Amino acid sequence: MPESKGYRAGGVDVRSPIWLAPLAGITTRTFRDFHRELGAGLVHTEMVSAVGLSYKNKKTGNMIGDDDEPRPVVLQLFAPDADSLMRGAELAYKMRRFDALEINMACPMPKVTKRCGGASLLNHPEEASRMVSSLKLLGSPVWVKLRITDKRVHPLSTENFCEEMLSAGADLLILHGRTPAQRYEGSADKAAVCEMSAKFPGVLAASGDCFTPEDAMKYLDAGCVAALAARGVMKDAFVIPKILHALGVDVDEKLWNPSPAYQIGALIEAGRAASSREGGPFARIMAQRMLSGLLKGLPGASALRSSCSTCRDWPSLEKILTEFRA
C-alpha cells in the first residue's frame, strides 16, 4: 500500500488526495478494497436510494456493506426530499457507521432525476438546503456532490448554489465539471471547477475526467482538496498509484508501473475475492469491466479481452486469465 501523509478534509481523516468515486453497479466492498490497496485516500459506496432503504429493499440494503470495512468510507445517498433522505440515512446508520454522509445532487440520469433526486435538486435549492441541514442532525460530516449549473435552466449559479449548501452546513462540496444536460458527454470543464475551488478554499473537491496524473494535478494545483477518480479507474485500473507517484508519494514501482503478469494476477485475486464475497456472477462482470483498463498496448491483450467477453461465469474467465498469465 502506498505511503502517503494523511490530512483532514470535510471533517474526515483521509490517506491521500485521490479518492475513489461511486460507480453504479461495481463499487462494492471488493472493488473498494482493490483501490484502497492501490492508495485511494477515501472510498465511496455506490449511490444508494434512501427511499429503497426505507422500503427495506434487500438489494439496496446490501449496498451499504459491513461495519468491518477499513475506513474512511463515505455513504452516498440520493432522495427526492429531506424527509426521505433522513429516514434512509437513519436506517443506514443502524447497519453500520460511515465517516461522512454524501447527498447526490449530480446524477443526471432520468431514472434518478424523474424521481426528483440527483441533479434535479439543482432546480430546487431550498429543498437541497433542507436536506443538508436535516442530515447534519445525525452528527456526521455532510458532503454534497453537485454539477456546474446552467444559468438558462437553473435558478442559481454554481457559485451561489455552493454558497447555499455551505450555509446550510455542508462540510465539503464535490463538484463535477459538467452540467446535467451534458450527462457524461464531451469534456468536463476543469477550469470551472478550479475557479470554484479558488472561491471556496479548503472545502471543494474535484470530479470529472480524472484519467491521468496531469488531470489530477490540474485540480490539486488549483487548490482542490482532492480529485476523484471514477471512469478513470475503468480506463486504467492502476491510475491511482500512477497519480500518487507523480505527486511524489512513496509508491512501490509494481503499482505505478505494473507488469502484465502483476496486472493479471491482481485481477485474478480481485475476482476470487468478489466471487467469495459478492458471488460468481458479479466477479465475472467486475473482472470483464476492469480488464478493459488493463494491458494497454500489450500484444495479445485485444484477443484476451475478446475471449473473456464471451465468458458467462467466473471460473471459465479465471481459467483464461490464469493461462494467459502463465
Image (spheres, helix red, strand yellow):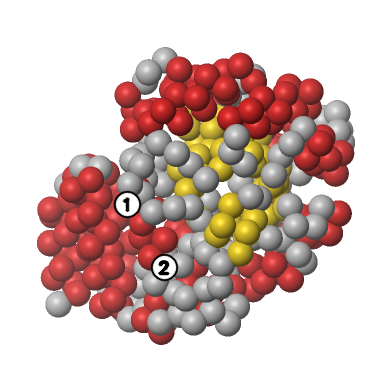
Residue 95 in percent (x, y) is at 38, 31
- Residue 220 percent across, percent down from the top left: 70, 67
Residue 12 visible in the displayed image = yes
Residue 263 image position (x, y, % from top left): 31, 72
Residue under circle 2?
38
Query: Which is more toward the observer, 8 or 226?
Result: 8
Q: Which residue is mark 1?
A: 30
Quarter in which the C terminus is drawn? bottom left
Q: Which mark is residue 278?
A: none
Badge 2 crowding class, 10 Å Cα cut-off, few under 14, some 14 to 19, many 20 or more, is: many
Q: Residue at x 69, y 44 (%)?
A: 171
Secondary structure at badge 1 equals helix
Residue 198 location, x and y as percent?
A: 84, 59
In the picture provided, is 177 more to the left or to the right than 196? left
Residue positioned 28% across, 68% down in the render: 266
Q: Residues within 10 Å of mark 1 (few under 14, many from 20)?
A: many
